Amino acid sequence: MPIAAAERALLSERRPLTRDEVRAVAALPLDELPDLIALAHRVRLEYCGPEVELESLINAKSGACPEDCTFCSQSVRFHTGVDVYAFLDLEQVLEAARATRVAGATQFCIVVAVRGPEERLLRKVVDAVHAVQEETGLEVACSLGLLTRDQAERLASAGVRRYNHNLETCRELYPSICTTHTWDDRVETARFAKDAGMELCCGGILGMGETLEQRIDFAFELAQLDPCEVPINLLDPRPGTPLEDRPLLAPRDALQAIALFRLVLPRAWLRLAGGRERVLGELQSMGLLAGANALIVGNYLTTGGRTAEEDHALLDALGMPVADGPGEGRFVVDDRGAHSLPARSPASTPVQLGGVGVATRGGGRFR
Ligand code: SF4
C-alpha cells in the first residue's frame, strides 16, 4: 500500500517522504498511475492551494555560449542554426515585459546564454531589472548562469526576486551532460543565490537518459536546496545537439515524474516548462492535475510555446485561478505546511504574447 503510506505521511503526519517510500510509489505499475496522480493533486492543493503561477521568459542574449551542455542549442560547440545576438536593447526588454503583464503573468525572467555574467553584461541586466520593475511592477527573475557570491549579492540588492539556476539532472548523470563545469559548480551558485536573499528557482530537464531511480535521486537532490520554484523541462531534442536523437519521454513517464516531484517537493511552485507541448500533447491538463502548479506562458528560449490565451483557457477549464502578483496572492506557508489562501484575482484578459524578444527562441528553460 505505498500510495496509502505516502498519503498518510504527507497529509496526516505532515512529514516528508523517505527515499524508500518514494521508490515504493515509483515501483507501482503505470496502470496505477491515476492513484499516484490523484495523491499528487491532493498534496498540491493541501500545501499550495489551487492557484497557478504564470511566468514568461525573455531570451535577452542568445547563442554563442562557450559551455557544452549536450541538450542546449545555444552552445557554440554545436551547429544548431540558433540565432546569435548580444544583449537586447533596453526598449526590447521593456516591450517583452509589457507583453508579459498584459498576458496575465506575474513573473518575468531575463535569461542570457553565458557561462556566467561578465561585468558589462551584469550592469546591463541590473539596468533592465530596474526599468522593468519601475514600468510594469512585475516580479523580475534572472537566469545568468554561474555567479560569484558578490554577483549574487548585487543582483539581490538590485531587487531581483528570484534566481533561476537549474541543476539540470542528477549528480550521477551530470558529467555525461556537461564537461565544462560541474554539478557542484551549479549547486554553489544556487546556494549563493539563496544566501544573498533571492528566492531560488532550481529544476532541470527530464528525459536525458536518466533512469527512474536517478529521477528520484534528482528530486531529492533538489529538495536539499529547498527551492521556491522547480521548473520541469521535458527534453525536446534539438537538431544539431548531441541529444538530437534521444527519444521523447513517454507521456505516462512524464506524468509519473511530475507526480513524484510533487511528493518530494510538496511546497514548491512546480513549473511545467519547455517540452510540455511536445511530450504531453493532449495530456497537458493532466500535468496540472499531477501536481504542477506553475506554467511558462508564451515561447521558450529556442522553441515556440502555446499562446497565453490557450493556457488561460486551460486553467479556466480546470478551475485553477491564476496566482496574483506581484507580492499579493503569495501563500504564506508555515512550518507545519499550513497556508493562507490569497484573494482571487479578477479574470485576466487573454492575449497573445508578442513583442520583440519575448523568448522568441529557446529550447525550453534550458539553463
Ligand atoms: S545550458 Fe546555459 S550554460 Fe549550458 S550551453 Fe546552454 S546557455 Fe550555455
Image: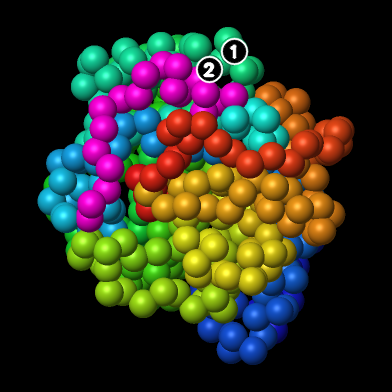
Query: Where 281 falls versus 300 (above or below)?
Result: below
Task: Identify which amino acid the numbered label 2 is placed on.
Answer: Val
Q: Is residue 332 above or below residue 136?
A: below
Residue 17 found in image quarter:
bottom right
| Percent of width and height locating residue 52 | 71, 46
Specify the quadrant that holds the C terminus: top left
> Given contact means CB atoms under 8 Å apart, are the residues at marks 1 and 2 in contact?
yes
- Identify which residue is drawn at 72% across, 78% down: 35
Residue at the location (39% across, 47% down)? 362
Question: In which quadrant of the rendered view does residue 42 lie?
Answer: bottom right
Residue 93 or 159: which is nearer the viewer? Answer: 93
Q: In the rendered structure, does residue 97 fall within the stretch colored magenta?
A: yes
Amino acid carrying mark 1 in the image: Glu
Residue neighbourhood size for the residue with mark 1, other residues' Cα within 10 Å, grouped as few (<14), some (14–19), many (≥20): few
Q: In the image, which residues are magenta?
A: 80-98
Q: Which mark is residue 132?
A: 2
Q: Which residue is mark 1?
A: 135
Give left or right: position of 192 versus 76.
right
